[in-house]
Amino acid sequence: MNRVCDVCNKNEIQKYSKSGRCASCARKKFYEDGGKNHNAGKKWNKEVKEKISNSSKGKKISDSHKKAIAIAMSRENNHFYGKQHTEETKKRMSEIRKKNIALGKINPLDSFKQMCKDAKTKGSSYELKVADFFDSIAVSYETQVNIEGKFFDFKLENNILIEVDGEYWHNYPNGTDKDKEKNEIAKRNNYKLIRIWGKEIDKVWRII
């Protein structure tokens, strides 16, 4: 049986550990004692980045290692546990994302594909179901289309936009202030906006 951390009594520790602490507790102790990250403020050059990337390619993490990482980063062990981003931070993150999309550093379609990939492992996704429906009838579409700084779920031909709204997050049946703002943006730009509630997702072919 693997040893358990002497401090948190939860995480497993490496067999060669002399401190009796898991990686999370050892790191916390290091910084409490005034330790500093020797890489702080440094930037890796392209050659070093590629070397680091190549060293990890093809390697698989064992299930026990995955579990240890999950435990080490869960709840109180996670530095962000119980915290929330401020509105100012959210706004700054949003502006950075929009800028990166405009510069071509981020492809919204790739983000959407990753979301769909995650949905396959975490459960159903309304957007994924709609995308599957469009694919099944060979309808071309764009995802996460930016209009006046707001992103719409789908854009079809003939200036049609589609938003797929979950009942909880979009205040069924009235919608949120953000939804109403997007309605105005669509109207102002001569788009027909169709909203589909999650409960109606299996009848999407009737709605569209």
Image (spheres, rainbow, N blue to C red):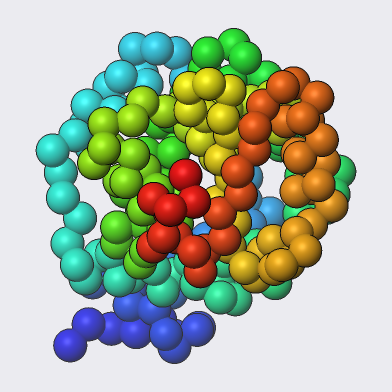
Q: Is residue 154 left or right of residue 173?
A: left
Count of residue discs:
0
Q: Quadrant of residue 126?
A: bottom left
Q: Is residue 81 left or right of residue 178?
A: left
Q: Is residue 18 visible?
A: no
Residue sticking out furthest to the front = 206
Q: In the image, residue 116 lies at what x, y percent? A: 36, 48
Give the vertical position of 51 relative to 193 (above or below).
above
Q: Nearer the viewer, residue 80 or 192?
A: 192
Q: Nearer the viewer, residue 196 or 50?
A: 196
Q: Residue at x 60, y 43 (%)?
A: 194
Q: Is residue 179 left or right of residue 167?
A: right
Q: Residue at x 42, y 28 (%)?
A: 141
Q: Nearer the viewer, residue 12 or 58?
A: 58
Q: Residue at x 30, y 46 (%)?
A: 132
Q: In the image, residue 42 lies at what x, y percent? A: 57, 24
Q: Quadrant of residue 52?
A: top left
Q: Is residue 13 visible?
A: yes
Q: Residue at x 50, y 83 (%)?
A: 7
Give the vertical position of 101 relative to 167 (above or below).
above
Q: In the image, residue 83 lies at what x, y percent? A: 73, 65
Q: Is residue 175 left or right of residue 128?
A: right
User: Can you say which quadrant of the picture contains the N terminus?
Assistant: bottom left
Q: In the image, residue 190 lies at what x, y percent? A: 72, 22
